[in-house]
Image: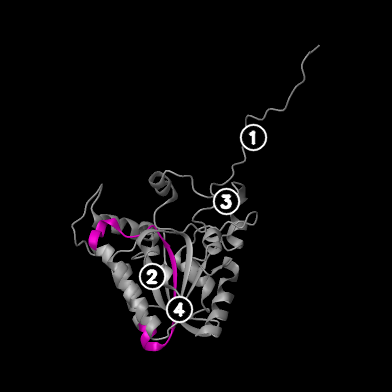
Amino acid sequence: MAWFKKTKDTSSEKKVKIPEGLWIKCEGCKEIVYRKEINKNLKVCPKCNYHFRIGARERLKLLVDEGSFTELDGGLISGDPLNFKDTISYKDRIKENQKKSGLKEAVISGNALIKGYPVCLVVMDFSFMGGSMGSVVGEKIVRAAERCLEEKRTLITISSSGGARMQEGIFSLMQMAKVSAAMAKLKDNGILFISVISDPTFGGVTASFVMLGDIIIAEPRSLIGFAGPRVIEQTIKQPLPEDFQRAEFLLAYGLIDMVVDRKNLREVLAKLIELLQ
């Protein structure tokens, strides 16, 4: 008589494999969320409303009237004025980022319609060298401002950047003054400039055109500042307030005008243009 129970042999059964990339961890609530659910919700967490970073082309699809966007100055590519090299040469780093992001530079600019209103858009992409502002990015912003001046269009910039591009040194820092002067011309001529800030936006980008908008809008929970919070804490030797440098903190202290969910941004931009242009 057998004193054991015969069990089913499962050694030959196939194990169920879960495809990689099916789930994603939310940086806001730390929950594991179904990736398709995130994508369906405009890359916003349905649990906590955390706004994931999106690329420049994704951003354009969400904002402009279908088929209305015409890219301009798309052929501009960064040079290497300093013959810079860190672990690899600057030229190779540009090629590497072009291949990774599918973009020629860290910004896409062009003319479009938003709810029928003519605008010029400048959209930064963090996936290209952290959206850093070098000579080409500065030049594209200035050219966009000049077109707005000539064609009486509203200028809308959407920023996502770590700041100035170190590989271009002083040439990158000079873009801060260059783009700020262009925004001053728009203001002097009564051309509406709306600055939209997404996560993260720092350094020379924040310290130049981003904070010069007639209206400054940020996506929820976006990190916005000049230096990072860790650097500031180490400098002042004091703990920082909760949510320091988050969009809602800046709104409470009057540094930005609005915090707008991604799903509402197109409607808000159209309404602002209608009222203020």
Q: Tag 2: residue type?
A: Phe
Mark nearest the camera among 2 and 3 is: 2
Residue picked out by circle 1? 13
- Helix, strand or loop at mark 4: loop
Between 20 and 132, the residue placed more toward the observer is: 132
Q: Quick check: 23 left or right of 161?
A: right
Drawn side of residue 271 relative to residue 76, left or right: right
- The N terminus lies in which quarter of the figure? top right
Within 10 Å of disc 3 (Cα), the crowding (few <14, some 14-19, many 20+) is some
| Cα distance between the residues tagged 2 and 3 | 28 Å
From the image, state whether disc 4 or disc 2 is nearer to you: 2
Disc 4 target residue? 69
Alpha carbon distance from label 3 to label 1? 39 Å
- Residue for badge 3: 28
Write the residue at 24% across / 49% down: 86
For the record, the magenta segment spans: 147-170
Label disc, if present, on residue 209 of the rendered structure: 2
